[in-house]
Amino acid sequence: TSRMVFANLAYGVCDNWDLFVRIGTADARDHAVARTAPFSASPGRFRHDGDYGLACGFGTRATFCYWGPWQFGGTTQITWLDPGKDRFAWSDPEVPGSTVSGSADADLWHAQAGLAVTYQIDAFRFWAGPFVQFVRGHFDHSGQTFTDGLATGSFTSSGDIEETSQAGVHFGALWQVSRKANCWIEGQYTSDSWVFGFGAAVVPSRILPGR
């Protein structure tokens, strides 16, 4: 699980095409259970709690055609996440008194491309369409093992991060509050994940003095 906050800056190349960059912060959290053996009676528990770290990205959006209130377009974006120093812990009910805890470093990038059909009615726009995504990353764990509260050794591990589902659908709605501002909500869904977000935007050329 990751919570992200971004500030976006977009530039309109023309009426139907813009480029954008964004910078912000993101964290990473995960609580999971896993059996240490096929016939294990009780699953072990893994907890990963991360701080906020740097997140940034760039992308482009374009509208390909119009047909009455309908629009057809697409977007492509790449986002890089480097959550802050994380903490993890592992415990196994079948080995009471034994735990593993320490710190973790992770970074990943997320590339996404999607198409969407948009319907506009008055000041509202609604859109939906398919998308594909690719997630790649790496993590390192380091810590200590404990038995009955006493340190008994050290622990290190590393691994790669990869998405389990590459295709999904995205959808959203936008409300044009005025000529100077709008706000929106949007979501994404795959067979193994979901995303929900909201935001607001202003158009600088419409709020600067003399414009």
Image (tube, grey):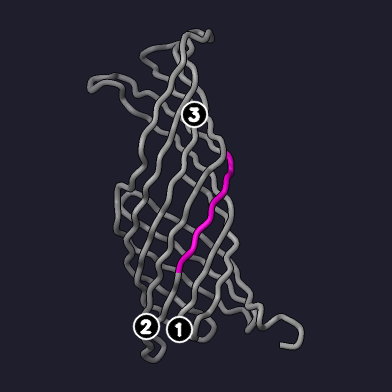
Which residue is outermost to the left?
38
Quadrant that contains the C terminus: bottom right
At label 2, the amino acid type is Phe
First in sequence, mark 2 or 1: give its number. Answer: 1
Q: Residue furthest bottom?
A: 68
* Mark 1 or 3, closer to the camera: 1
Q: Which residue is rendered at x = 54% and y = 44% of the image?
A: 27
In the displayed structure, would residue 20 be above or below residue 149?
below
Snapshot quadrant of residue 11: bottom right
Task: Report which residue position mark 2 lands on.
Answer: 64
Question: Badge 3 is on which residue?
Answer: 88
**In the rendered image, the vertical position of residue 95 relative to residue 184, given as above or below:** above
Residue at 45% x, 28% y is 141
Range of magenta residues: 51-59
Q: Secondary structure at mark 3?
A: strand
Amino acid at dot 1 = Asn
The answer to whether mark 2 and mark 1 are in CB contact below 8 A is: yes
Left or right: residue 104 versus residue 45 is right
Q: Main secondary structure of the magenta part?
A: strand
Q: Which amino acid, by three-letter code, is at mark 3?
A: Phe
Category of crowding for the residue at label 3, using alpha-carbon neighbours closer than 10 angstroms: few (below 14), some (14–19), many (at least 20):
many
Q: Is 166 within the magenta? A: no
- Rendering coords of residue 124 (x, y %): 51, 80
Identify the mark nearer the N-term, 3 or 2.
Answer: 2
Residue marked by disc 1 = 16
Q: Secondary structure at mark 1?
A: loop
Q: Earlier in the sequence, mark 1 or mark 3?
A: 1
Residue 5 percent coordinates (x, y) = 57, 55
